[in-house]
Amino acid sequence: MRTEIEQDLEMIHDAASLEAFRLKHLVKKGTLQELVDQLRTIPKEEKPAIGKVLNELRQFVEARVASAKEAIEQHTAIETIDVTLPARIPNIGHVHPIRQTLDRIIDIFSGMGFSVAEGIDIEDDYHNYEALNFPADHPARDMQDTFFIDDPAGDVMLRSHTSPVQIRMMKHHAPPIRSIMPGRVYRNEAVTARSLA
C-alpha cells in the first residue's frame, strides 16, 4: 500500500491531481481509513505493531500532501503575479466631506465664470467689522464671539466671516465683480444637542 501511495504522490503536480489523491486515500472511505478499519480483524497481540506502522504511514502521507499543496500554491501565486505591471499605490486617507463639497461649489461657480478669491485668516478690526458698518458697540460683535489676538498695533482677530475678502476685492478691482470667497471662519460657538434643536 505504501508503494502505491508513494507512486500516487509522485503524480501530484497541480490542484486537480492533489484533489484526486485526497479523494482516493484520505477521505472517510479512502485506502488509509480502510487499513485502519481492518485493524479489527488483526489478532490483539499484533495490533500495537501494525497500529504503529499505520500511524507512521498516515503521518508520512499528511506531511507529503502538505508540502505538495504548499508547492502548488506557491507556483500558482508566481503565475498570477504580473511583475511587468506598475506598482499599486495604496490609497491613504481621503478628502474630507466639507472639502469635497467646497470643491464642487468652486467647480460650479468657476464654470459660470466666477473667480475664486481667498483672503487671510487673521484680520484687522477695520476689514472684519468697521468697513462692514459694524461699529464698536454693534451687537453682532458679541453674538459672533470673535477670537481676538493680542497685538500692540491694534485690534487683530481671526476672521469671523469671509466678508473681509469682499472688502479687499472691492478696494483693488473695479465693478462688476464676479467672485466667490470660500474659506474658513473662526467663531467661538458652543454647539450642543440643545442648540441644534
Image (cartoon, rainbow, N blue to C red):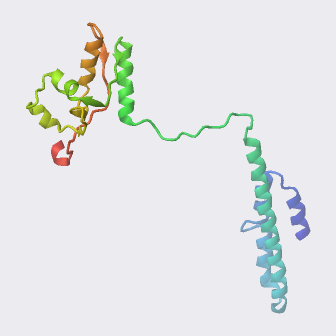
- The residue drawn where x is 23% and y is 32% is 160
The answer to whether residue 15 of the structure is visible from this angle is no
The answer to whether residue 25 of the structure is visible from this angle is yes
The extreme bottom residue here reads 45
Q: Which of 86 and 130 is in front in this view?
A: 130
Residue 60 spot, x, y in % from top left:
82, 70
Q: How many labels does the image show?
A: 0
Q: In this view, does 49 lie above or below 157?
A: below
- The residue drawn where x is 88% and y is 70% is 2
Residue 31 spot, x, y in % from top left:
80, 69
Considering the image in quadrants, where does the N terminus appear? bottom right
- The residue drawn where x is 76% and y is 61% is 22
Residue 196 spot, x, y in % from top left:
18, 42
User: With 86 as the anchor, is 16 left or right in this view?
Assistant: right
Q: Nearer the viewer, residue 125 or 64?
A: 125
Considering the image in quadrants, where does the C terminus appear? top left
Q: Is residue 163 above or below residue 66?
A: above
The extreme front residue here reads 152
- The residue drawn where x is 34% and y is 23% is 118
Q: Is residue 37 above or below residue 75?
A: below
User: With 18 as the anchor, is 108 left or right in this view?
Assistant: left
- Examine the image and state in which quarter residue 182 appears: top left
Residue 139 spot, x, y in % from top left:
9, 33
